[in-house]
Image (cartoon, rainbow, N blue to C red):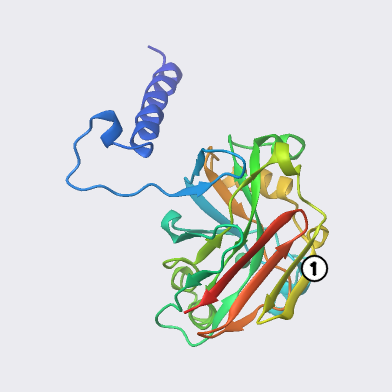
């Protein structure tokens, strides 16, 4: 068998096995010593839930936020980091979810973001086809232990402890594209205890959702279930226990958490 065919065959078989495991080993009759919960996000207008494969986040995607983080937005190519899937904290519409203040930080920051959820993927996806892969959109928070993120950056170490911790990704339900269309222009804002802190429009993003998908697919093959936090506007800042965060994005219901 030619090498390419063999690779295609075994690559395909490995992918199929991965998909089976991801959808629940128990349901497939596979024995495991313990179970690990799937990460799921409710889908608006459906009894189905969105299974999360990976959480990607773009950094410094609004010029004013890049400047407040100390970088030059005109020269920087896009960069991405990940959060673990179980960092998801689902926040139902119309509720204020209790969000625990995490350990190890004295400077806990909010970042309100549009999240794009993919129904399909690929490698080297061209920009003009990228939005075809979007299943829907959600409003999310990229919660950040800013002091730890900065300290690690200063030491040229990974950001992980500042960004990729338990419950660092509160998110509302996913709104399918056929209900809300593609979101790229609306106002996005965040208030703490009723005072507006972040206030911008999605059109201020340096890299659009389509560009993000295209760029990210050059680095990693994308798959159904991948979600992308599309960056936060300027004026990030701290919260403390007792604060309530209210996020708004034109076209989607509000998202709210209280720090406990
Ligand atoms: Mn962010």
Q: Decide which of 101, 103 is in the foreground and name it.
A: 101
Q: How many residues crowd mark 1 within 10 Å: few (<14), some (14–19), many (20+)? A: some
Q: Decide which of 34, 74 is in the foreground and name it.
A: 34
Q: What residue is drawn where x is 77% and y is 60%?
A: 205
| Element type at mark 1 | strand
Q: Quadrant of residue 79?
A: bottom right
Residue 188 position within the rendered picture, expressed as x and y whole percent measured from the top left: 75, 64
Q: What residue is drawn where x is 34% and y is 49%?
A: 37
Left or right: residue 8 compared with residue 70: left
Q: Can you say which quadrant of the picture contains the N terminus?
A: top left
How many dots with numbers? 1
Mark 1, ligand 1, within 8 Å: the answer is: no
Of the four image quadrants, the one with ligand 1 is bottom right
Residue 195 position within the rendered picture, expressed as x and y whole percent measured from the top left: 72, 82
Taking the view exactly as shown, the residue that stands out farthest to the front is 94
Taking the view exactly as shown, the residue that stands out farthest to the top is 1
Residue 253 position within the rendered picture, expressed as x and y whole percent measured from the top left: 69, 57
Left or right: residue 73 compared with residue 240: right
Q: Decide which of 106, 88 is in the foreground and name it.
A: 88
Q: What residue is drawn where x is 57% and y is 38%?
A: 46
Q: Decide which of 60, 155 is in the foreground and name it.
A: 60
Q: What residue is drawn where x is 25% and y is 47%?
A: 35
Name above or below for residue 62 compared with residue 69.
above
Residue 250 position within the rendered picture, expressed as x and y whole percent measured from the top left: 78, 58
Name above or below for residue 164 compared with residue 128.
below
* Residue bearing mark 1: 200
């Amino acid at each position: 068998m030619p090498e390419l065919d063999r690779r295609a065959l075994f690559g395909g078989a490995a992918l199929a096995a991965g998909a089976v495991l991801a959808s629940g080993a128990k349901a497939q009759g596979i024995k495991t010593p313990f179970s690990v919960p799937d990460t799921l996000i409710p889908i608006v207008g459906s009894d189905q839930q969105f299974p999360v494969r990976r959480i990607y986040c773009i950094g410094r995607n609004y010029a004013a936020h890049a400047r407040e983080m100390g970088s030059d937005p005109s020269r920087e190519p896009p960069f991405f980091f990940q959060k673990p899937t179980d960092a998801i904290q689902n926040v139902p519409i119309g509720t204020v979810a209790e969000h625990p203040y995490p350990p190890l930080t004295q400077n806990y920051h909010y970042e309100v973001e549009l999240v794009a959820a993919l129904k399909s993927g690929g490698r080297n996806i061209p920009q003009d086809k990228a939005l075809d892969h979007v299943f829907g959109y959600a409003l999310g928070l990229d919660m950040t232990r800013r002091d730890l993120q900065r300290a690690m950056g200063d030491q040229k170490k990974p950001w992980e402890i500042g960004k990729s911790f338990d419950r660092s990704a509160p998110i509302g339900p996913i709104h399918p594209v056929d209900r809300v269309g593609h979101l790229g222009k609306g106002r996005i804002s965040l208030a703490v205890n009723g005072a507006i802190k972040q206030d911008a429009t999605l059109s201020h993003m340096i890299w659009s959702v389509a560009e993000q998908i295209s760029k990210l697919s050059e680095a990693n093959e994308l798959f159904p279930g991948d979600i992308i936090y599309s960056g936060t506007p300027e004026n990030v800042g701290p919260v403390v226990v007792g604060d309530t965060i209210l996020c708004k994005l034109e076209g989607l219901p509000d998202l709210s958490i209280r720090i406990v």
